[in-house]
Image (tube, rainbow, N blue to C red):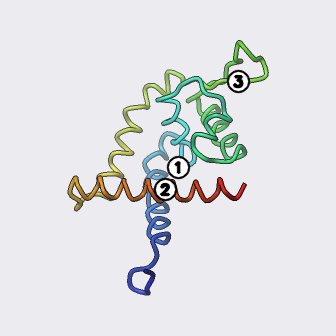
Amino acid sequence: MCNDKKGSIGRWISLLHRYGNVYINEQLKEYNLGAGQYQFLAVLYQNEGLSQDEIACFLKMDKGTAARAIAKLEKEGYVERKVFSVDKRIKKLYLTDKAYAFESKLTSILLGWTNIITKDLSVDEQEYALKLLNKMSLNAEDFFKKMK
């Protein structure tokens, strides 16, 4: 399946990821955010009140990466930590007014990237691509679960 002209699936996924990060970083620069933080905001927009560890698990990221990203969001005034009333050792993450005001802008930026990479794809092609990428992600997840 891999030849010099087509390359591997992993190569194309990696290329899209790198281009996406460049686009996201450029779009978020004026908000003092980058590609390393927006995913955490996106999760909190849908699931406010999660702990740092819960978000890391949800995004399949290590705890150190999550800690750095959330610290940056906190420093920039997008999230705040509040002690969990049931277990005082746990801090839950909540969005600030600044984050709520930013939600539509982030959505617009992300939609912009989606529009760029799907420009010449039909709706059916987009749905099929999502289906294939989801299937590949599940295969990778299954592989790593079996390694543990």
Alpha carbons under labels 1 and 3: distance apart: 24 Å
Q: Earlier in the sequence, mark 1 or mark 2?
A: 2
In-front residue for pair 8/21: 8
In-front residue for pair 19/66: 66
Which residue is drawn at the image coordinates 36% and 52% (left, top)?
113
Residue 32 lies left or right of residue 20; in this view the side is: right
Alpha carbons under labels 3 and 2: distance apart: 29 Å
x%, y% of residue 105?
38, 36
Residue 31 lies left or right of residue 143; in this view the side is: left
The residue positioned farthest toward the top in the image shown:
85
x%, y% of residue 121?
24, 60
Q: Which residue lies under the disc numbered 1?
A: 35
Alpha carbons under labels 1 and 2: distance apart: 6 Å
Residue 116 lies left or right of residue 137; in this view the side is: left
If the image is split into quadrants, where does the C terminus sit?
bottom right
What element does badge 1 sit on?
loop
User: Could you classify mark 1 by the number of other residues whose Cα lies within 10 Å: few (under 14), some (14-19), or many (20 or more)?
Assistant: some
The answer to whether mark 1 and mark 2 are in CB contact below 8 A is yes
